[in-house]
Amino acid sequence: MIIYNETYVVEASAEAEWLQWMRQEHIPAAMATGYFNSHKILEVVDSPNEGVTYCIQYLTDDMTKYYLFRDRHVHHLHTRHHQQFENRYVLFNSIMKTLN
């Protein structure tokens, strides 16, 4: 299983608005691309960062699907996110693979 992970550090004052927007806009848009089987929203409980840290994980069974998503959709999704929450978050991404 391939996991595309987006880790966001969000200003505490924007947390409720951000989480609602992610659930209603960003995640549904990413899932609508058809490249992912499921997703998870995780909150980092003991984050060393200021603000609140969340991980959004998108799961797919094929690295090619991730590459297609990255090449066709990530820029647009991240641009929309930046327009909505400019200067109120930090984002970094990672790709992980589950091991048997």
Image (tube, rainbow, N blue to C red):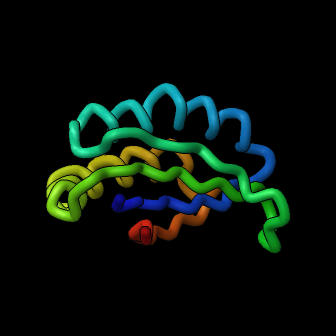
Question: Which residue is drawn at the image coordinates 31% and 51% (left, top)?
Answer: 60
Q: Is residue 17 above or below residue 99?
A: above
Question: In the image, is residue 75 above or below residue 23?
Answer: below
| Image coords of residue 1 (percent x, y) | 35, 59
Residue farthest to the top? 24
Q: Is residue 95 positioned above or below 36 on the image?
A: below
Q: Residue at x 23, y 50 (%)?
A: 73
Residue 24 x, y percent position in the rendering: 49, 26
Is 59 placed left or right of 87 in the picture?
Answer: left
Q: Residue at x 53, y 31 (%)?
A: 23
| Residue placed furthest toward the front | 100
- How many marks overall? 0
Residue in front for this viewpoint, 92 or 12: 92
Percent position (x, y) of residue 4? 39, 60
Q: Quadrant of the C terminus?
A: bottom left
Q: Is residue 20 left or right of residue 22?
A: right
Horizontal side, residue 77 vs residue 82: left or right: left
Q: What percent of the width, then of the height, locates residue 7?
A: 56, 62
As rendered, which of 89 and 58 lies closer to the eye?
A: 58
